[in-house]
C-alpha cells in the first residue's frame, strides 16, 4: 500500500505494510560531521555502522527521492557473495591475496546483512537458501564448470561451491533444460524495500538526520548543495550509484544500465511441488544476458533480466508495463519454467544499476579532503554495499584495517567513452551477447559474438 503522494517504483514498495510518506527535504543551511549523498544500501549501511561506532557523530543522509528509491528498493533481492570484477582480481597475482580476503569477506557480508537487519528489528524476509545457477546449454554448463573449478583452485571448498549434475539440480529446482549447475550456500533472498526503508527508519530513530526529496546539485570539499539548502560537513560521501551521471563532471564515471523485473501472483502449492525452490534459494541460468529470480516470502516468483542502456546515460524511474522489455523478461521466465504460462504477472518495474568502465566496484576516500565515494556494483550490490559501507566507515575514521586493504579500496576505473560511441558500442556488445546466447541454445557456436561480448562485459 502506498501513500497518495508517493508512486511505488517496484513491487517491493507496493508490498510494504506501512505507506511510504516522504520525509521532509533539507531546508536552509546545516552543519554535520558527515554528509552522505544517497539513501540506498550504501549510504544507509555507511550511516548505520558510523552511528554504531560513533554514536555522537552528527550524520546526515540526503536523498533526491526517498530512501530505497534507487536500485536498493527495486532489485532482485539476491544478497549474494558475488560481484563482477572479483574473479579477475583473484586471477591476477598482484591482487590475488587482497581479492581472496575480499571474497571471504563477501561470504560473511551475506550473513552480516541478516544479523544486522535482525539486530535492528528489520524484518526483510531474509532467508539464506543459497543460490542455484543452471547451465542450460553445453557451453554454459562448461563455463559454469570452469568457474567452479577456478574457485576450488583458489582454495574455496565444496562447502562454498557445490557442483550439481542434472538430477541433483532437479532435486532443488526443476528449471527446464537444466543440464546441471552450481550451488553456493552464500546467498540469501530478501525483500529489498523492507530492508532499505527499515534501515532509514532505524537510523532516524537513532538520531541520524534523513532528508528526502532533496536532489544534491553539487558536491565539494566540506559542502553539499541542494536547491533549498546546504550542508557543511568535514566528510562528504557520495553513494549515488546509477544516478552519479547526473552530478556535474561525473557524466561518464558510472554508466546507468537498466535491469527489468516482473512478479507473479502468489503461486499455489501444486506449482511449487512442480518447480521446487524449497527453502527459497535464489536461481538463475548462466546466459550472458543475465537472469535472476527468487521465491518471495508470500510465494510469488520475482524474476529479472538485463535491460537497456539509454542514450546519453538516460535514466528511467518508471516504465510502460507494455514495454517489449517486460515481454522479453516474461519469455525468459517461461523458458525456465514453462508451466507458469497461465500465471498472472502482477507487477513490472525496472531500475538502474551502476557500471564502471572495467565493471569493478570501488570504495574511495581521500583523508585530505574528506571526500569519499562508493559505487559500480553492476547489479551485485545487495551484500557488497554492506561491506563497502563498513569499509568506508573505517576510512572515514582514518583507520587501517584488513578491510581498508581490500582490492576495491581506491580502485580507479577510467571514464566511459563519450556519446555516441558509448551508446553504439555498449548496445552493440549487449546485442552480440544475446545473439551468442541464442546460437548456443540452438546448439551452434557463439563464435565472434560470444568472444566480443566476453571481452567487454563481466558476468
Ligand atoms: C532491477 C535491479 C535488480 C537488481 N538485482 C540485484 C540482486 O538481486 N542482487 C544484488 O546484489 N544486486 C542487485 N541489483 C543491484 C543493487 O540493487 C545495487 O547494487 C545496490 O542497491 C546499490 O545500492 P546503492 O545504495 O549504491 O545505490 P542505489 O540504491 O541506487 O541508491 C542511490 C541513491 O542515491 C540517490 N541519489 C542519487 N543521486 C542523488 C543526488 N544527486 N542527490 C541526492 N540523492 C541522490 C538516489 O535517489 C538513490 O536513492 C539490482 C539492481 C536493479 C536495478
Image: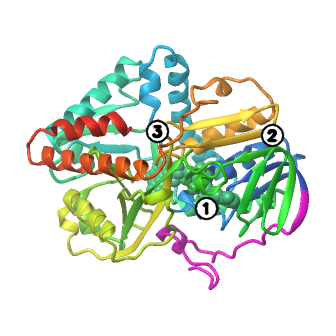
The alpha-carbon separation of the residues under discs 1 and 2 comes to: 23 Å
Up the image or down, 86 lies above or below 428; here it is above
Residues at discs 2 and 3 in contact (Cβ within 8 Å): no
Residue drawn at point x = 18 percent, y = 66 percent: 339
Earlier-in-chain disc, 1 versus 3: 1
Up the image or down, 309 lies above or below 25; here it is above
Earlier-in-chain disc, 1 versus 2: 2
- Res. 68 mark: 1
- The residue that mark 3 highlights is 359
Region in magenta: 1-30
Earlier-in-chain disc, 2 versus 3: 2
Residue 410 visible in the picture: yes
The alpha-carbon separation of the residues under discs 1 and 3 comes to: 23 Å
Crowd rating for badge 2 (residues with CA inside 10 Å; few <14, some 14–19, many 20+): few
Residue drawn at point x = 62 percent, y = 48 percent: 250
Image quarter of residue 457: top left
Determine whether the beta carbon of the residue marked 1 sits less than 8 angstroms from the nearest atom of ligand 1. yes
Up the image or down, 116 lies above or below 411; here it is below
Residue furthest to the left in view is 443
Mark whose residue sits in front, 1 or 2: 1
- Res. 53 mark: 2
Image location (x, y in percent) of residue 359: 46, 38
Mark whose residue sits in front, 2 or 3: 3
- Which element is circle 3 on? loop
Determine whether the beta carbon of the residue marked 3 sits less than 8 angstroms from the nearest atom of ligand 1. no
Amino acid at each position: 500500500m502506498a501513500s497518495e503522494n508517493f508512486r511505488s517504483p517496484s513491487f517491493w514498495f507496493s508490498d510494504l505494510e506501512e505507506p511510504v510518506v516522504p520525509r521532509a527535504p533539507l531546508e536552509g543551511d546545516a552543519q554535520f560531521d558527515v554528509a552522505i549523498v544517497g539513501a540506498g544500501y550504501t549510504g544507509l549501511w555507511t550511516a548505520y555502522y558510523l552511528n554504531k561506532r560513533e554514536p555522537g557523530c552528527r550524520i546526515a543522509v540526503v536523498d533526491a527521492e526517498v530512501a530505497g528509491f534507487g536500485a536498493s528498493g527495486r532489485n532482485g533481492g539476491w544478497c549474494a557473495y558475488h560481484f563482477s570484477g572479483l574473479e579477475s582480481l583473484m586471477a591476477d597475482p598482484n591482487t590475488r591475496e587482497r581479492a581472496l580476503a575480499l571474497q571471504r569477506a563477501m561470504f560473511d557480508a551475506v550473513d552480516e546483512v541478516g544479523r544486522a537487519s535482525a539486530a535492528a528489528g528489520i524484518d526483510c524476509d531474509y532467508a539464506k537458501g543459497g543460490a542455484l545457477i543452471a547451465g542450460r546449454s553445453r557451453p554454459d554448463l562448461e563455463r559454469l564448470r570452469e568457474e567452479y573449478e577456478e574457485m576450488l583452485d583458489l582454495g574455496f571448498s565444496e562447502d562454498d561451491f557445490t557442483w550439481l549434475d542434472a538430477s541433483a539440480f532437479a532435486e532443488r529446482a526443476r528449471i527446464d533444460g537444466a543440464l546441471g549447475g552450481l550451488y553456493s550456500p552464500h546467498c540469501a533472498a530478501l525483500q529489498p524495500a523492507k530492508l532499505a526503508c527499515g534501515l532509514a527508519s532505524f537510523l532516524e530513530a537513532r538520531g541520524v538526520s534523513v532528508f528526502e526529496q532533496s536532489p544534491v546539485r553539487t558536491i565539494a570539499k566540506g559542502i553539499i548543495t541542494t536547491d533549498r539548502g546546504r550542508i557543511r560537513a568535514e566528510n562528504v560521501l557520495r553513494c549515488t550509484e546509477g544516478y552519479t551521471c547526473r552530478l556535474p563532471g561525473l557524466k561518464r564515471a558510472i554508466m546507468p544500465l537498466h535491469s527489468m523485473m516482473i512478479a507473479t501472483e502468489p503461486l499455489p502449492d501444486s506449482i511449487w511441488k512442480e518447480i521446487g525452490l524449497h527453502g527459497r534459494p535464489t536461481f538463475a541460468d548462466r546466459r550472458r544476458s543475465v537472469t535472476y529470480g527468487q521465491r518471495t516470502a508470500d510465494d510469488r516468483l520475482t524474476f529479472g533480466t538485463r535491460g537497456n542502456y539509454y542514450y546519453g546515460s538516460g535514466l528511467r524511474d518508471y516504465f510502460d508495463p507494455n514495454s517489449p522489455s517486460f515481454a522479453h523478461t516474461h519469455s525468459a521466465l517461461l523458458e525456465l519454467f514453462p508451466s507458469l504460462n497461465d500465471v498472472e504477472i502482477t507487477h513490472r518495474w525496472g531500475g538502474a544499476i551502476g557500471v564502471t568502465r572495467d565493471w569493478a566496484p570501488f570504495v574511495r576516500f581521500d583523508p585530505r579532503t574528506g571526500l569519499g565515494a562508493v559505487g559500480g556494483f553492476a547489479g551485485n550490490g545487495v551484500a557488497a554495499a554492506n561491506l563497502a559501507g563498513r569499509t568506508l566507515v573505517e576510512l572515514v575514521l582514518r583507520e587501517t584495517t584488513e578491510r581498508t586493504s581490500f582490492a576495491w579500496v581506491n580502485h580507479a576505473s577510467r571514464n566511459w567513452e563519450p556519446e555516441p560511441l558509448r551508446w553504439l558500442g555498449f548496445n552493440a556488445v549487449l546485442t552480440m551477447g544475446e545473439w551468442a546466447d541464442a546460437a548456443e541454445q540452438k546448439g551452434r557456436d557463439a563464435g565472434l559474438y560470444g568472444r566480443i561480448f566476453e571481452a567487454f562485459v563481466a558476468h
